[in-house]
Structure formats: C-alpha cells, structure tokens
Amino acid sequence: MHLLNLIRSKTGAQHTALHTHPLLIHLTSKTITHEIFTEIMTRFYGFHTGITNELKVNKFCQPYDDLFASTIDHLERDLALLQISLEDVAIYKPHKDLNTQEALWAYLYLLLGSSLGGKVIHKSLIENLSTYTSEYTFFQTSSNAPYTWKDFIVMLDKKTLNLNHEEIAAIAQNLFSGLYEWMENK
C-alpha cells in the first residue's frame, strides 16, 4: 500500500482537475448529451491507444498485453455504437518515452483506476442519458475484464519492489496531466 499511497498523494491535484474538467463533469451530472459523450469517448480512445501503442513495444509489458487489448477493444466497441470511424480519431503522442517498467506501472494505475471509475460512470450514464444503453462498455465494466482494481492493488507493491517508486508516482502525475491536456486541446 506504500506505493499506492505515494501515487495518490502525488497525483491528487491532477486527479481532481481531471474529474472537474468541463467535459468530464458532464459524466456524472444530468447535463450529459450524446454529443458530449461522443467527444469524451473519442478523446479517451485516442489517449489510451497512444499510450498502449508506446508501451506494447516493450517486452516487460507483455504480461499485460491482454489488458491493453481489452481496453482498446472496449473503447472501439463503444465508438462503433456511437458510429465513430476509428480513422477519424486523433491518437495521443506521449510527451515522454514510456520505455520503463516505472512507466508501465504508472499507466496501469491510471488505466485500472479509470476502469474502476467507469463502473460508476456507466451507471450514471444509463440513468441520465436516455439514448445510452447497457450495450456500451465504457472501458472495462464487463465482468470479464482481465484485471480489476483489486488485482492491481495486490500486484502493485509485490511487482514493483525493485523499481523507483518516486519515478512511478512522477510518471503517473505526468500521465494525468497529459490526459487533462488531451481532453482540453485535442
């Protein structure tokens, strides 16, 4: 739990900023529209595709390829339901190289946290957007997601024992900031 607490303390401001972003605030309010949801999903797809493309070239990420593939698959299915062509979606280019194990764990924190939040958002969208149905997956809300937040917490300290925890937290901070900027300026 040491690393989890460190990441949370280092990313707190970025996490709060992201949740209060003008686009994302609509997810949990009654102001969500189909157009806003479409914009949010295209940005999430572009961001997560860009990050996973960077990470997949590293052999140490291979144990998590199923998680990356599942994430992109869920997002692609949501975009298909929204009738968005993948060719029309801009792909995020990370500001820094993500060629370290520290970067992998920082991204897993962001990804699996987003998946956890996706369950709450999924319920809210069904309640607040009449055109939204349970067909949408919003990340990995299905029961067959390869990893859960609980799985991640169990793995985090064990698998990162010999890694630089400060670096993981700093990269997570940069990833949150990068996602915010991507939501802002895509």
Image (cartoon, rainbow, N blue to C red):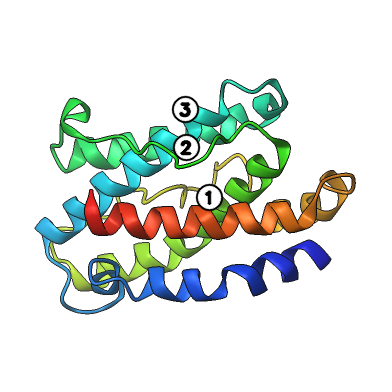
Provide residue 117's location: percent of width, then percent of height.
47, 64
Mark 1 neighbour class, 10 Å CA radius: few under 14, some 14 to 19, many 20 or more: some
| Residue 99 visible to an observer of this rendering | yes
Residue at 32% from the left image edge and 39% from the top image edge:
46
Image quadrant in which the N terminus is located: bottom right
Residue pushed farthest front? 96
In the image, what residue occupies the spot 24% across and 35% down? 90
Can residue 115 be seen in the rendering of this structure? no
Q: Indicate which label's residue lies in the foreground, 3 or 1.
A: 3
Helix or strand or loop: what does disc 1 sit on? helix
Q: Nearer the viewer, residue 19 or 176?
A: 176
Q: Earlier in the sequence, mark 3 or mark 1?
A: 3
Q: Position of residue 33 (x, y in %)?
A: 12, 65
From mark 3 to mark 2, how far is it between C-alphas?
5 Å
Q: Nearer the viewer, residue 129 or 176?
A: 176
Q: Which residue is mark 3?
A: 53
Residue 51: numbered disc: 2
Neighbours of disc 2 within 10 Å: few (<14), some (14-19), many (20+): many
* Picture quadrant where residue 64 is located: top right
Name the secondary structure under disc 2.
helix
Residue labelled with disc 1: 111
The reply, left or right, for residue 31 in relation to residue 126 is left
Q: Quadrant of residue 183?
A: bottom left
The mark that comes first in sequence, 1 or 2, is: 2
As measured in the structure, the alpha-carbon distance from the residue carrying label 1 to the one carrying label 2 is 10 Å
CB within 8 Å, label 1 to label 2: yes
Residue type indicated by callout 1 = Leu
Residue type, mark 3 in image: Asn
